[in-house]
Amino acid sequence: MEKDSYPKMYLYKRIVQAKMFIDEHFAEAIDVNDIADEAYFSKFHFIRLFKKTYGKTPHQYLTSVRIEEAKQLLKNEMTVTEVCYAVGFDSVSSFTGLFKREAGNTPSEYKSQQIALKMQIKKKPLNFIPGCFAGKFVEHKKSNFQEARS
C-alpha cells in the first residue's frame, strides 16, 4: 500500500460514514453540522469532500433521499402532509416545491398518477409484464419466415 493512500482511504471512509448517517437519519431534523460532526470534519471541509465524492452537497443529497422516500410513501395511503413530516420536512409548502423540482410534478399529482397506475395494473395486469419475461413462458408459433426455411 502506498504511503499516501492510507490517509485518502481514511478520509473516504469518513465521507461514506457520513452518507450512511444521512441514509439512516434522513427523517430526523439533521443539518450539515450534524452530518459533518458524524464524519469528524469541519463543516466547509466536509461539504467540499462530500461534493467531490458524490457530486452533490450533503444538503442536496439529504433532499434527494427524502424525496425518493416520499415517492415510496405516496404510493401508499398516506396523505401528502403525513408524507411531508414522515420524511423530515418541516413545511408542506417547501416539501411541495422541492418535490416538484426533483420529480417534475407536485406530490398530489404524483400520488394521483400512482393511484391511476395501480388501477390500470388491476384492470389489465398482463399489459405490465415485460415482454422479455412473458416470452419465456409463452409457446411461440413458427413465423412465416421460419416455416419457409424448414
Image: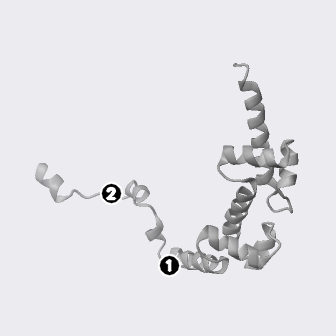
Residue beneath the point at 87% across and 53% down: 34
Question: Residue 21: x, y in percent?
Answer: 81, 49
- 83 vs 95, nearest the viewer: 95
Residue beneath the point at 61% across and 69% down: 103
Q: Is residue 41 shown to the viewer in this render?
A: yes
Q: Left or right? Give the position of 114 relative to 67.
A: left
Question: Residue 117: x, y in percent?
Answer: 54, 75
Badge 2: how crowded within 10 Å, few (<14), some, or many (20+)? Answer: few
Mark 2 secondary-structure assignment = loop
The image quarter containing residue 82 is: bottom right
Q: Is residue 76 shown to the viewer in this render?
A: no
Q: Left or right? Give the position of 86 relative to 110.
A: right
The image quarter containing residue 5 is: top right
How many numbered marks, from 0 up? 2
Q: Which residue is mark 2?
A: 139
Mark 2 residue type: Glu
Badge 1: how crowded within 10 Å, few (<14), some, or many (20+)? Answer: few
- 19 vs 53, nearest the viewer: 53
Question: Residue 40: x, y in percent?
Answer: 87, 41
Which of disc 1 and disc 2 is earlier in sequence?
Answer: 1
Residue beneath the point at 78% across and 32% down: 10
Cβ atoms under marks 2 and 1 closer than 8 Å: no
Quote the CA–CA distance across marks 2 and 1.
24 Å
Residue beneath the point at 80% across and 69% down: 89
Mark 1 secondary-structure assignment = helix
Mark 1 residue type: Lys
What scheme was used to colour the molecule? Answer: one colour
Position above or below: 78 against 134: below
Question: Residue 147: x, y in percent?
Answer: 15, 54
The disc label shown at residue 123, or none? 1
The image quarter containing residue 95 is: bottom right
Position above or below: 133 against 86: above
